[in-house]
Image (tube, coloured by chain):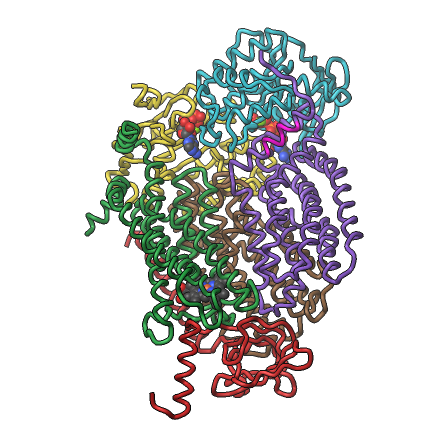
Chain colours: A green, B red, C yellow, D cyan, E brown, F purple
Amino acid sequence: MWQWFYKLGSPRYFYEMTTGFVPWLARATFLLLAIGLVWGLGFAPPDYQMGDNYRIIYIHVPTASGAIWIYAMMAVMAAMHMIWNIKVADMVAKSCALIGASFCAVALVTGAFWGKPTWGTYWIWDAKLTATLILFFVYVGVMALRSAFDSETAASKAASVLTLVGVVNLPIIYYAAYWWNTLHQRSSELGVRDASANPPEIWIPAVFSGFGLIGLIFVIIILHTRNEILLRERRAQWVQELVKQETGNA
Amino acid sequence: MTPARKQKLMIVGSIVLGSAVAVALMLYAFNQGLNVFFTPTEIAEGKVGADQNIRIGGMVKMGSLVKQGAGTTITFIATDTNEDIPVAYTGVLPDLFREGQGVVAEGRIDANGVFQANSILAKHDENYMSAEVKAALDAAAERKAAGGTP
Amino acid sequence: MLSVANLACERDERVLFANLAFTVAAGSLWQVQGANGSGKTTLLRILAGLNGDYSGELQWQGKVCSEVRTEYQQALFFLGHAPSVNRTLTPLQNLRWFCALQGFADDAAIHSALNEHGLRGYADIPCYQMSAGQQRRVSLARLSLTSAKLWILDEPFTALDRVGVAELEARVSRHAAAGGAVILTTHHPLQTQHPLTVLNLDALRPEAA
Amino acid sequence: MLSVANLACERDERVLFANLAFTVAAGSLWQVQGANGSGKTTLLRILAGLNGDYSGELQWQGKVCSEVRTEYQQALFFLGHAPSVNRTLTPLQNLRWFCALQGFADDAAIHSALNEHGLRGYADIPCYQMSAGQQRRVSLARLSLTSAKLWILDEPFTALDRVGVAELEARVSRHAAAGGAVILTTHHPLQTQHPLTVLNLDALRPEAA
Amino acid sequence: MSRVALGLGASLRATLRRELQLAISSPGKIVNPLMFFVIASSLFPLSGRLDIDVLGSIAPGIIWVTALLAVMLSMESLFRSDYDDGSLEQLLLSPQPLYFHVLIKVLGHWLVTGLPLVVVAPLLGLLLNLPAQGYVPLLIGLVLGTPTLSLIAAIGTALTVALARSGVLLAVLVLPLSIPVLVFGAGVVDTALNGLPVAGVIALLAALLVLALSFAPLAIVAALRINVQ
Amino acid sequence: MSRVALGLGASLRATLRRELQLAISSPGKIVNPLMFFVIASSLFPLSGRLDIDVLGSIAPGIIWVTALLAVMLSMESLFRSDYDDGSLEQLLLSPQPLYFHVLIKVLGHWLVTGLPLVVVAPLLGLLLNLPAQGYVPLLIGLVLGTPTLSLIAAIGTALTVALARSGVLLAVLVLPLSIPVLVFGAGVVDTALNGLPVAGVIALLAALLVLALSFAPLAIVAALRINVQ
Ligand code: HEM
Ligand SMILES: Nc1ncnc2c1ncn2[C@@H]1O[C@H](COP(=O)(O)OP(=O)(O)OP(=O)(O)O)[C@@H](O)[C@H]1O
Ligand SMILES: Nc1ncnc2c1ncn2[C@@H]1O[C@H](COP(=O)(O)OP(=O)(O)OP(=O)(O)O)[C@@H](O)[C@H]1O
Ligand SMILES: [Mg+2]
Ligand SMILES: [Mg+2]
């Protein structure tokens, strides 16, 4: 277990292990997303109240919860980087920040465009919305801090510290729900648990697009991390050999 | 004990102590109740005095919606099935606002006990259903209400 | 006292030094030499524990430095390029804080340290009113206050006038002679009675070898 | 070229120098000497027109400096304690701006100036990645770019390694020999072929006299 | 020799004394955040013709937001000169427990910058037409909240100390983290103005303070070590 | 030699290019003021439960005040690194006309920090529920007002450049001077929201800009000369 853990911590092992694995993950992801989105956006029946507007759900919900989970993952990576000085963990954290922030932005934008027809306003200072906005700010802070440093080591350590400090905000944001009323709906889990209310035509595509999005998150993170590995290890012998091979093949 | 050890112990000690105190304070806070968002029941219990700027949440009671005059002023009854409160509002309504649907209103309770809203937001519930399903369900509910067995 | 094994450091693709191994014994005086950019400052900061970006091992009295950090820091005096002198405070206030961080208070000693370093009468003048060399002297007055065994000094002669340079050279030799150890960098030829060990980073650089 | 009459300056009640009078002729090389805090930096900044807190008169080519300011500034190159090198820009970008301020553009000259100062290959590396001495070299590369007659240099040898010091000494001598004039401060003994005029502020100080 | 050995307490007092000496020798350090607080709050009434009651109802928000900005801006200088002149290296290399020295440094800074804000806040309340029952909650909130803000801002300062003039970056890091303090702090006043009980909110503010007191020094020390490379 | 003599225009372009290069090499310089602008504006609605209409009516004030703060904070770095590393001495000693170089430097800085603020302002309008007829006046006001604010802030920066980390002092100097811009700037939106003609207020803003363009460089140059002693 520990051995595996340390092995995964080595950039080279990470790179080589993912080389075979990523294309399959990417294909599966593409399939899931295609089914989920085409079905959800194209064929699922319109909602009795919101008509076709509700279709935004197939993008909004996964990106919104994705943004939250990605932060959690980033924090775990930051902790691993601080405690065991695992470089790959930092590279993953860096990728997490980028796509977490993008997901957060997408959730905000889709939510806002959804809010106009349903609630009558693009934006309201409601707990969940506010929490999402703050999360976005924290992501941006982490990225801004990282890019402000010249030295790679200092940048990654500083970003890790800020990421961990930012974790404190998460439960507080959660309790802020007591503060603003929640206009945003509570978690419905789309009726997956007690299939009583939401019919399968609506939640099955959501499940597809949800898993597709999870796959997408991992594909992007892994690809980004692989890039980062090549960049940071560009002088390591194995990378040089890899480059030689690639250019030889080309 | 070496000085280094002693230092570490002091630091760990203050962190543990701090966490304990913080947890205690938070528990106390949550016991106090932090709500500034009220249900009709809480209002009926007299938790809110007149002329406090608050938010209320509930459902628009079936059959209570009345449009007045040119149609920009409305009154309706907000309910949490337990208690009711009359609400008055002037302004543009969101699409989702309709009877039987969740609503959040912000405003004050006037001297007559009417909630004078200065903003109204509609709330979607946690369920999504297609128009046909909704119709079928409604029909079933009606039949049930009529006392028939399916 | 301090022994270094297998030390290597690279910055931005360039290996500054690799396989560095040496032992700084009590009573020795080391000068780290090298052209501009050869890595002297980097090496000194690694030895002082301020730069963690290296591979290799540092041992203090036979124990790994990072494990006996407090002990090592008690035995270490480091002075970098910057003088560590707050410009709005007076020399007295500056040095008082330094002493408190070392765990003692002793105004008489501070005054005599200032006098020794040619700053008689300057104890209560804010440091921003002093010239570059005078500020450096305030900084060096710490040498008379610390009880550290190992001194690590990065270009300590900067901005000192000739008298100041000679005095510092003498002080450094005395410390080594009294059983301490000194590691310093400087670009000017040192004039000391004490035997000098020179570590030349230029000669050590892999590509140069 | 530059002549000084009756120059006096005091800082915080202390007279640094008074009745200073000298003329820096074309082809001469001046070293301002003095203990720490004797006023060398202050004097140089007064001569460069950066410090107006003095009494006395400065003349450039027989005209009062402040009246022929642009002309004087065209003929002057000043380098203070700070290297005047922006750390986020590259040497090339830094020197391009310097040239533009002098009213010309010439990338070839910049590259050869960098090569001359031991920075071949560093033209496009951000300066924060360089050591203290390398930054100082970027700064000194200006000497090969300026066409100023009068150079005023405050401790230009700081942070330079031995080769750098020797090169700069040679450069300064050549400039004086070619009909320019140089005023500099340094605490280390200058080794130049060119005759050196020493201005010792310690000897000049009223209380010392 | 007349050498007196100092315990931890005495050497912490030396750090506190130094912080206060620095403040005294440049009085701007005390006065400027205050002036900023007053001027920035009065920008709002200037920037639009507001109804006087509306002004009163947004007063807690304005006061809290400007207090937050004032604390943050004044914290910017906390480790700055120490970093520039190398004193920070000396602190990091001293055999003393950094955790406590850093904590004392922040608290010393709060004494000279945060506390005066609390003292003038009622004046701003007057300017902004804050209703009478808002003053006591405002003060309680500020007393508990500004040290927390100082500690959070100190984390940001420590993270950015190696970067030249990083005022805006500091804001981008610190403001999101401070939002909970702001929400509960202004919430105390709001709750009181609405006639509701404030004990719960105050307890939350206190909890945040205690948390910050125990965890912020860890983050600050880690951040300083990273920056002094 | 391949030496090309440069006229004033070309050497001003070199100064502008350097300013842009500095911005590009640290992208935070562009992004951070923007983020500050967004985050600081959203602090207000967070700090109290505001009625949505009230929020809309104070939106112009909030946007203008935070824009002012963002411009001021980002200006802090204008002469900072040049002062620290001695480049400012070189500028002052160059035979070039300082007046124009300083003007170009400020405008270059405005291009990378002020202009982006104008671009995201409508987004903040959305968040703060600004009524639809307020957007165009807001943009016009900001386009005319932010360069003026930059110039005023530059005077403050130049005055305080010799002081380490002077963020708060800068604010104390600059904010009072900026009040007219703020009043007219927010006034444009207010006037439009009230359905009154805005041409007069816009003309006043433009007049302030022209005044600042012609006099601010004088003050900046004088301030720099004082500080580089
Ligand atoms: C800018 C506006 C909005 C933001 C920032 C936002 C944010 C979020 C977030 C963060 C989540 C994930 C919650 C979680 O995983 O715990 C979420 C889920 C969801 N949102 Fe939104 N939302 C917005 C607007 C809307 C609108 C207008 C609707 C439609 C009425 C909506 C419907 C949903 C639904 C159905 C879910 C899934 C339920 C759940 O798991 O919580 N959202 N939203
Ligand atoms: N900012 C200042 N305010 C007041 N007095 C100052 C200031 N800077 C320097 N002085 C005083 O002016 C005198 C001369 O300082 P100056 O920097 O010119 O000395 P210097 O000869 O260059 O010394 P060094 O060899 O140390 O560089 C010093 O005695 C100092 O006390
Ligand atoms: N912040 C940095 N980031 C990346 N590389 C750096 C950094 N600082 C220094 N370097 C590189 O590290 C090398 C060693 O620098 P260092 O400061 O240790 O040299 P030095 O021997 O002290 O030189 P000097 O005599 O000029 O003081 C230099 O070649 C420089 O290019
Ligand atoms: Mg060095
Ligand atoms: Mg000097």
The residue lying at 42 percent from left, 43 percent from top is A155
Quadrant assignment, res C80? top left
Whether residue B18 can be seen here: no
From the viewer's perspective, is B123 left or right of D209? left
Tell which of A205 and D59 is nearer to you. Answer: A205
Secondary structure that dominates the magenta span: helix
From the viewer's perspective, is C116 left or right of F176? left
Q: From what the image shows, is residue C54 above or below residue A117?
A: above
Q: From what the image shows, is residue D17 above or below residue E141?
A: above
The residue lying at 55 percent from left, 62 percent from top is A122
Q: Which quarter of the rendered picture does the N terminus of chain C lie within?
A: top left
Give the percent coordinates (x, y) of residue B23.
Answer: 40, 69
Tell which of A156 and A53 is nearer to you. Answer: A53
Whether residue E124 can be seen here: yes
Q: Which residues are magenta?
A: F12-19
From the viewer's perspective, is E193 left or right of C136? right
